[in-house]
Image: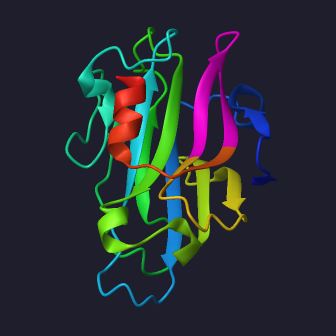
C-alpha cells in the first residue's frame, strides 16, 4: 500500500518496505501548452553526497551525461524530453546494497534545460511528482505530488534519500530554485 506524503514529510524505508534492496525513483510531470516557441526539456539529476554535503567525485553526480554512479548503485534510465503520457517520465534505479559507504544522502533534482533562454519555468509544468517503489515487485512505497505553483522557479529539488542510524529514509522536499543545473553542480561539487 502506497503512502501519499506531503512536503517535508519523511518515511523510514526499513519500516515501510522491510527488506527493500532495489528502489526505483520515478519522476513525472506534464507540460502546459505555452507560447515560448520551443519544447520543454526537463532533466532529472541525482547528487550523491558524503557527510560533508559534497559529492566525493564528479562521477557521483548522475545525470544525462553520466547515467551511472561509479559504485553501480544509482542509474538513470535516460532523458525523457517530452513528459508526455501517463506515469513516470524519468526513472532512477537505486541499489541500496551497492551504495558506497561514504554516501550519506542523495538529492533528486529536476531542472529545465536552457530555461532562461527559452523563457520557461515550473509554473508552466503541472502534475509533478516523485515516487519511490520496489523495483522487484513494482509496488509503490510512497508518492509525493508537488502541488505548489512554482511560477518563477527553473529548478526543483523533488526529494531526497538519506541515511540515519544506518537506515535509509525518504523525504519529500518540494523546494524551488531560480537557477540552473550548473548552480547545483557548483554547490555540491
Q: Quadrant of the N terminus?
A: bottom right
Residue 132's place in the image compared with 127, above or below, is above
Position of residue 99 measured from the top left corner of the image (x, y, whole percent): 42, 20
Residue 108's place in the image compared with 81, above or below, is above
Q: Residue at x 61, y 61 (%)?
A: 129
- Seen from the viewer's position, the closer of residues 11 and 110 is 110
Q: Residue at x 56, y 64 (%)?
A: 152
The image quadrant that residue 140 belongs to is: bottom right
Position of residue 55 measured from the top left corner of the image (x, y, whole percent): 38, 20
Residue 163's place in the image compared with 115, above or below, is above
The image quadrant that residue 150 belongs to is: bottom right
Position of residue 76 measured from the top left corner of the image (x, y, whole percent): 33, 46
Q: Residue at x 31, y 80 (%)?
A: 39
> Which residues are drawn in magenta?
158-172
Residue 17's place in the image compared with 157, above or below, is above
Please, what is the dominant secondary structure of the magenta stretch? strand
The image quadrant that residue 57 belongs to is: top left
Q: Residue at x 60, y 47 (%)?
A: 132
Amino acid at each position: 500500500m502506497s503512502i501519499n506524503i506531503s512536503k517535508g514529510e519523511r518515511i523510514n524505508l526499513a519500516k515501510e518496505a522491510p527488506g527493500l534492496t532495489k528502489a526505483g525513483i520515478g519522476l513525472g510531470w506534464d507540460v502546459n501548452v505555452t507560447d515560448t516557441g520551443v519544447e520543454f526539456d526537463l532533466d532529472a539529476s541525482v547528487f550523491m553526497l558524503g557527510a560533508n554535503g559534497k559529492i566525493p567525485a564528479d562521477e557521483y553526480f548522475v545525470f544525462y551525461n553520466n547515467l551511472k554512479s561509479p559504485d553501480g548503485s544509482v542509474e538513470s534510465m535516460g532523458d525523457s524530453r517530452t513528459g508526455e503520457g501517463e506515469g513516470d517520465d524519468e526513472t532512477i534505479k537505486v541499489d541500496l546494497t551497492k551504495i558506497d559507504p561514504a554516501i550519506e544522502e542523495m538529492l533528486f533534482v529536476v531542472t529545465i534545460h536552457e530555461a532562461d533562454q527559452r523563457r520557461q519555468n515550473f509554473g508552466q509544468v503541472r502534475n509533478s511528482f516523485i515516487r519511490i517503489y520496489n523495483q522487484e515487485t513494482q509496488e509503490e512505497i510512497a508518492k509525493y505530488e508537488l502541488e505548489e505553483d512554482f511560477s518563477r522557479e527553473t529548478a526543483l529539488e523533488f526529494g531526497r534519500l538519506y541515511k540515519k542510524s544506518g537506515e535509509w529514509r525518504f523525504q519529500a522536499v518540494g523546494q524551488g530554485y531560480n537557477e540552473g543545473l550548473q548552480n547545483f553542480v557548483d554547490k555540491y561539487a
